[in-house]
């Protein structure tokens, strides 16, 4: 797919089992959540008693959403034991 002079490689989308627009919508949603959480984190940095677990709780939900989407398109575990993120 080309947009002007930019050639977009579609391998990642094929790996995810998504169309360009499905992937775009999902990525924009995650970007929006992360953008808002950046303000939550900044507020927490200035006022430690506010939003004490909001960012970490929401990030945990976001990670589960990402893995669920991946699991729906790929029956193989996206994070084998050797690459499982540490909690």
Image (cartoon, grey):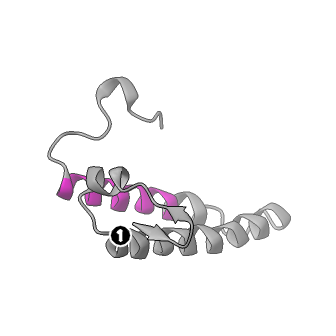
Quadrant of the rendered image containing residue 43: bottom right
63 and 27: which is toward the camera:
27
27 and 85: which is toward the camera:
27
**Image coords of residue 4 (percent x, y):** 55, 73
For the image shown, how many numbered marks are present on the structure?
Answer: 1
Dominant secondary structure (helix, strand or loop) of the stretch shown in magenta: helix
- Residue 84 higher or lower than 54, as above or below: above
Outermost residue toward the left? 75
Query: Residue at label 1?
Result: 20
SS for tag 1?
helix
**Image coords of residue 72 (percent x, y):** 18, 58
Quadrant of the rendered image containing residue 32: bottom right
Q: The magenta stretch spans which residues?
A: 58-73
Quadrant of the rendered image containing residue 60: bottom left
1 and 81: which is toward the camera:
1
Give the quadrant of the N terminus: bottom left
**Image coords of residue 30 (percent x, y):** 49, 68
- Residue 4 higher or lower than 63, as above or below: below
Residue at (59% x, 67% y) in the render: 34
Judged left or right of residue 37, residue 25 is: left
**Image coords of residue 52 (percent x, y):** 65, 62
């Amino acid at each position: 797919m080309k947009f002007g002079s930019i050639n977009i490689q579609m391998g990642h989308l094929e790996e995810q089992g998504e169309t360009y627009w499905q992937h775009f919508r999902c990525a924009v949603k995650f970007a929006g959540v992360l953008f808002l959480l950046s303000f939550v984190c900044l507020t927490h940095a200035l006022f430690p008693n506010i939003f004490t677990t909001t960012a970490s709780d929401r990030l945990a939900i976001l990670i589960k959403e990402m893995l669920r989407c991946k699991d729906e398109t790929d029956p193989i575990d996206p994070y084998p034991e050797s690459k499982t993120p540490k909690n």
